[in-house]
Image (cartoon, rainbow, N blue to C red):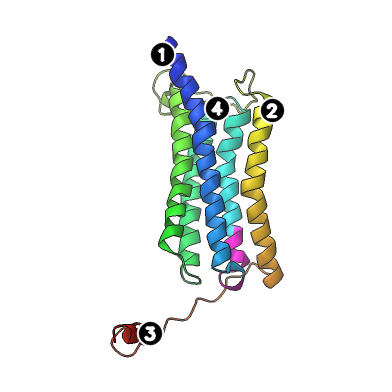
Amino acid sequence: MKRSLGVETASRRWLIGGVLPLWLGAGLADWYRHKQTRIEDTAGARESMIHSLMMAEAGVPVALGLFCEVNAGVLATCAGALGVHSATAYWDVSYAEERREVSPIEQHFHSLLEVVPLMATGFLAVLHWDQARALVGVGERPDFRIRFKRRDPLSWKSRAALLGAMGLFGVLPYAEEMLRCLRADPSLRARPEAPEPQTDGTGETPLAHAAKG
């Protein structure tokens, strides 16, 4: 029993002190890459809107985990949000890579932003394994009610600090990005694709050919 309680406590601490900061850090680094590649002049507000949509999709499991009793309903919602987030992430990259430079380091940030919600959902399922099993028809009856926590190991101060960190390092940078894009072009329409670099007939750009001497 002591070991089981220790594992549960450690899992909660890792979710709050490891997974959540990793997600916010990757998101902040990704925002900086967008700024470096002048998203407002390339992909525009359409891509920034997709980023905001992904943040909202990832924020749903976080909010449910913080404030609601974790049961089959919450786990199913988290899994659904995870699936929608993955589809939106594919939309994001397929739109962006035709309009601005998406470097390998930015792709790495994207990988983290996709994997971290999966990690969080997995930890929630492990912490509430009885309802995770019930969700697939094994064991007890699944509980699909969405209700606020009756008892919570996190204090209100801790939850307020977490929400503040999400606002400061997540919502605020991407709100700034959207405003910057809308100032450049107050429209969510898709921007035209970037022109293909000219080649010299050998399949290489003149610059690459000159670099070879």
Mark seen at residue 144: 4
Quadrant assignment, res 208: bottom left
Vertical position of residue 35 compared to residue 71: above or below: below
Q: Specify the amino acid type for callout 3.
A: Leu
Quadrant assignment, res 103: bottom left
Q: Are marks 3 and 2 in contact (CB under 8 Å)?
A: no
- Number of marks drawn: 4
- Residue at the disc numbered 1: 3
Select label 4 or label 2 by which is in front.
Answer: 2
Q: CA distance from mark 3 to mark 2?
A: 57 Å
Select label 1 or label 4 by which is in front.
Answer: 1
46 magenta-colored:
yes
Q: Residue at x 66, y 46 (%)?
A: 168
Q: Position of residue 113 (x, y in %)?
A: 48, 48
Which badge, 1 or 3, is on the more N-terminal residue? Answer: 1
- Residue at the disc numbered 3: 207
Q: Residue at x 56, y 45 (%)?
A: 24
Secondary structure mainly formed by the magenta segment: helix
> Which structural element holds mark 2?
helix
Select label 4 or label 3 by which is in front.
Answer: 3
Q: Quadrant of the N terminus?
A: top left
Q: Which residues are magenta?
A: 41-49
Q: Are marks 4 and 3 in contact (CB under 8 Å)?
A: no
